[in-house]
């Protein structure tokens, strides 16, 4: 009989490896084929150097990409939506600070027809005025709602404080900027950046199907990458924004930090996990479980392509703001002054490595990791090396990392509430 009073034996994850994608070219644009999909589905992603970094007018990246599926030179937004629905396919668009993505999900039996319409979207967007007006109105309504949320304002103001309001990593849209966007802005932006940097295909396609697929792509020359100047902005040590009527305060503590290509990034990534990366982390145990100051608190690294940030975030009752910040600083000091005990290290390591393995549990997730390697100019064995480094880290290593990168007096603080 199974004795449910005895926990099952713990086995620490031991290995992580990503499959090697097949790379081919259309013109000088690399096309990566990631196999291993058991279902007859296909995901096609076009990655563009078209994030906020490349904007000459605020908001053009976001709105251009949101508008791609809202009509082409030959089809209305309704016609585009109806065709994709009939084919069991759909399109996703995402924009970020560095990159913008246009993605197609389709059944492999319909991929040729779905691809034709997808490429029409990718090469002949119409940016119709009526659709843009609707999208702008929705965006303004959503912005007004979000600006009433202390957590939204805190995150927005935190990035602005770290990088500066005019830097792509710190810039946030306002109503005036949204209202000023017109179709001509989107057309000009897309004309300037609308050539993919790289293409990813996640599907089980044989060699003939791959050749057929490549022959359909109209792209020949990749976009020329732009170098982003590092932010020279000097952040304020502390910013407090009073929000009348709010019963809670949103906290953001952090600073500029490492990017994935930095040699010490794996050490800091795991240390951040110990501090506030999972439910059993130090911040959760102290601030949530022992003190009862919040329902949730986290610590995270957010690496962009050229710069990164370390951030701690939580929502607390207004009267507990000072106490919460003091306790956070105590936990940071403990990391640099006392070695982590073996049981805590073992639990955090097991959770981190297990989560990393879970993140590559399906082919689409595998492609995300492969994209990170390519887009951040990392070595092909980056995740294998990360896995092994976390296995090797000692309490002394982590204490030194905390002293170097997470000194409690080095963090900038933003409070909203």
Image (spheres, rainbow, N blue to C red):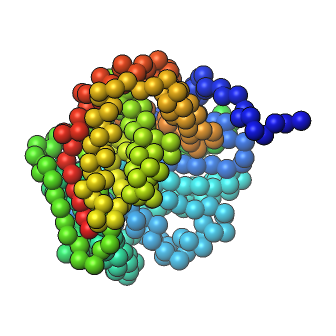
Above or below — where is 188 with respect to 141? above
Q: Which quarter of the rendered picture does the C terminus lie within?
A: bottom left
Q: Nearer the viewer, residue 129 or 73?
A: 129
Above or below — where is 333 with respect to 293? above
Q: Which quarter of the rendered picture does the N terminus lie within?
A: top right
Identity of the residue drawn at 45% across and 45% down = 285
Evaluate whether residue 352 shows in this view.
Answer: yes
Q: Nearer the viewer, residue 294 or 30?
A: 294
Question: Which percent across, then down, holds residue 244?
Answer: 23, 77
Question: Which percent across, then down, holds residue 314?
Answer: 36, 56
Count of labels shown?
0
Identity of the residue drawn at 49% across and 74% down = 77
Q: Is residue 344 left or right of residue 161?
A: right
Above or below — where is 213 with respect to 194? above
Question: Which percent across, then down, holds residue 154?
Answer: 27, 61
Evaluate whether residue 385 shows in this view.
Answer: no
Q: Nearer the viewer, residue 409 or 414?
A: 409
Q: Is residue 294 left or right of residue 57?
A: right
């Amino acid at each position: 009989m199974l004795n449910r009073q005895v926990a099952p034996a713990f086995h620490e994850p031991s290995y992580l490896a990503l499959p090697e994608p097949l790379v081919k070219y259309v013109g000088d644009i690399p096309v990566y084929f990631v196999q291993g999909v058991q279902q007859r589905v296909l995901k096609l992603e076009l990655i563009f150097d078209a994030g906020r970094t490349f904007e000459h007018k605020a908001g053009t990246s976001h709105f251009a990409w949101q508008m791609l599926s809202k009509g082409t030179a030959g089809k209305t937004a309704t016609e585009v939506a109806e065709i994709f629905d009939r084919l069991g396919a759909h399109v996703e668009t995402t924009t970020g600070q560095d990159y913008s993505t246009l993605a197609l999900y389709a059944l492999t039996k319909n991929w040729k027809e779905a691809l034709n319409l997808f490429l029409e979207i990718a090469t002949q967007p119409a940016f119709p005025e009526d659709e843009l007006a609707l999208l702008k109105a929705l965006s303004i309504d959503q912005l007004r709602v979000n600006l009433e949320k202390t957590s939204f304002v805190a995150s927005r103001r935190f990035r602005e404080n770290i990088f500066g309001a005019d830097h792509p990593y710190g810039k946030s849209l306002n109503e005036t900027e949204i209202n000023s966007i017109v179709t001509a802005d989107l057309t000009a932006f897309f004309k300037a950046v609308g050539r993919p940097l790289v293409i990813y295909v996640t599907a089980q396609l044989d060699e003939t199907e791959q050749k057929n697929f490549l022959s359909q792509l109209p792209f020949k020359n990749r976009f020329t990458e732009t170098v982003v100047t590092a932010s020279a902005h000097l952040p304020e040590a502390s910013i407090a924004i009073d929000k009348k009527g709010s019963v809670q305060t949103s906290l953001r503590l952090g600073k500029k930090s490492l990017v994935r290509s930095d040699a010490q990034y794996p050490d800091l990534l795991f240390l951040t996990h110990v501090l506030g990366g999972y439910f059993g982390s130090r911040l959760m145990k102290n601030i949530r479980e022992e003190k009862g100051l919040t329902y949730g608190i986290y610590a995270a690294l957010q690496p962009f392509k050229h710069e990164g940030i370390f951030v701690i975030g939580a929502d607390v009752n207004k009267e507990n703001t000072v106490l919460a910040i003091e306790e956070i600083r105590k936990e940071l000091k403990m990391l640099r002054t006392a070695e982590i005990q073996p049981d805590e290290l073992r639990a955090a390591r097991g959770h981190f490595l297990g989560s990393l393995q879970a993140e590559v549990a399906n082919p689409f997730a595998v492609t995300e990791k492969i994209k990170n390697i390519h887009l951040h100019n990392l070595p092909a064995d980056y995740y294998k090396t990360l896995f092994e480094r976390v296995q090797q880290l000692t309490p002394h290593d982590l204490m030194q990392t905390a002293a170097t990168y997470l000194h409690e007096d080095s963090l900038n603080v933003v409070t909203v509430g």
